[in-house]
Amino acid sequence: MGDLLAAINAVRAQARSCGSTAMPAASALSWNSALASAAAGHSADMAANNFFDHVGTGGSTLTSRVNAAGYAWSALAENIAAGNSTAAATVSQWVASPSHCQAMMSATYVHVGGSCMYNASATYRYYWTIDLGRP
């Protein structure tokens, strides 16, 4: 997922408008394996069960997934996307959405973990999740 991290950090390196909100450039994020594990579980759930939502099967939430992965956090955010086959296209989709863009650009977050899972028989085939955090 190095291409995903590189694409996110390239976005953060430049000030931009996320909708009507001006966001200054932000420091690069570090990859976190616990956040990546939480994101992978959610992407796999969406791909396997053919749904697209922040709430997983069984009612899992961002906080429950990140807690289960063992990440001790003071701030969290999650972006999900579906349908794109590349990290670059997915990050571009998030930049075009004000709330997703703001999450990626926020200086609050210092860690990120992400995942893409594929299921040829699911509606969108590619299911992406990034979890952003601050200990």
Image (cartoon, rainbow, N blue to C red):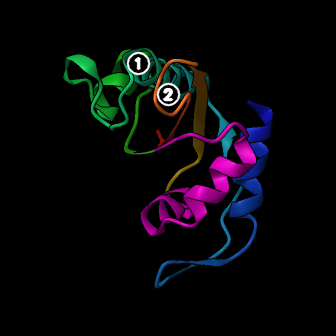
| 58 in relation to 85, above or below | above
1 and 2 marks in contact (CB < 8 Å): no
Q: Position of residue 68 (x, y in %)?
A: 36, 16
Residue pictured at 51% horizontal, 34% vertical: 124
First in sequence, mark 1 or 2: give its number: 2
| 84 in relation to 68, above or below | below
Residue pointed to by mark 2: 39
* Residue 85 shown in magenta: yes
Query: Viewed as shown, does residue 55 lie left or right of 20?
Result: left
Residue pictured at 77% horizontal, 58% vertical: 10
Q: Position of residue 118 (x, y in %)?
A: 59, 21
Query: Disc number at residue 45?
Result: 1
Residue pictured at 69% horizontal, 36% vertical: 85
Q: Quadrant of the N terminus?
A: top right
Label tally: 2
Displayed quadrant of residue 46: top left
Query: Viewed as shown, does residue 16 lie left or right of 56?
Result: right
- The amino acid type of the residue labelled 2 equals Ala
Query: Viewed as shown, does residue 70 lie left or right of 106?
Result: left
- The amino acid type of the residue labelled 1 equals Asp
| 44 in relation to 133, above or below | above
* Residue 75 shown in magenta: no
Query: Viewed as shown, does residue 102 lie left or right of 68?
Result: right
Q: Secondary structure at mark 1?
A: helix
Which residue extends farthest left? 59
Residue pictured at 41% horizontal, 29% vertical: 72
The rendered magenta stretch, by its main secondary structure, is classed as: helix
Q: Position of residue 14 (x, y in %)?
A: 74, 72
* Magenta residues (range): 80-107
Q: Position of residue 112 (x, y in %)?
A: 59, 39
Q: Secondary structure at mark 2?
A: helix
